[in-house]
Image (spheres, rainbow, N blue to C red):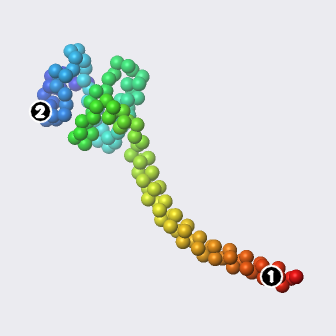
Amino acid sequence: MIKSKYSVRAPITAPFLTTSSSRPAGWASAIALSYDDPVAPAKILTEFAKQYDKLELRIGVLGGKVLDSNGIKALAALPSREVLLSQLLSVMNAVPTSFVRVLSAVPAGLLNVLQAIKSQKESATEQ
């Protein structure tokens, strides 16, 4: 929680913050920061706001861009960084894996054809 007088001075250094004139009188302001995971504050505050109706998420900032309440909710809906990285890795790994499967299918198919010819010739010589 921050005092309103500090939130009035904050736009000097951070112009994306709202001034006290855009808030109704008597409202408290809070700022949540995260240096490791930019999505974590949005997720935590969105979950908290679901439990407590009095909490209203009005504005957020990510990478210098201002987000409205819908942007914060969309950010909170994103998977974590680790999940996104694992999904990216699985997609990147799928291409070479598929390529190797295609390349190995050609000799395997040839081997199957040769095996079928061998068994056909063996059955023809037994008769």
Residue 95 in percent (x, y) is at 47, 62
Residue identifier under label 1: 122
Q: Which mark is residue 10?
A: none
When the figure is inspected, residue 126 is found, relative to residue 24, above or below; the finding is below
Amino acid at the residue labelled 1: Glu
- Distance in Å between CA atoms under marks 2 and 1: 90 Å
> Disc 2 on helix, strand or loop?
helix
Residue 15, image quadrant = top left
Residue farthest bottom in this picture: 125
Near mark 2 (Cα within 10 A), the count class, few <14, some 14-19 or many ≥20, is: few
Residue 67 in percent (x, y) is at 27, 35
When the figure is inspected, residue 88 is found, relative to residue 7, above or below; the finding is below
Give the residue at x 32% y 23%: 56
Give the residue at x 19% y 31%: 17
Residue 40, image quadrant = top left
Residue farthest right in this picture: 127
Viewer-nearest residue: 127 or 94: 127
Viewer-nearest residue: 78 or 37: 78
Viewer-nearest residue: 22 or 30: 22
Residue 116 in percent (x, y) is at 73, 76
Residue farthest top in this picture: 26
Between discs 2 and 1, the one toward the N terminus: 2
> Disc 1 on helix, strand or loop?
helix
Residue identifier under label 2: 12
Amino acid at the residue labelled 2: Ile
Residue 55 in percent (x, y) is at 33, 22
29 lies left or right of 121: left
Give the residue at x 13% y 28%: 9
Proximity of marks 2 and 1: CB atoms separated by less than 8 Å: no
Near mark 1 (Cα within 10 A), the count class, few <14, some 14-19 or many ≥20, is: few
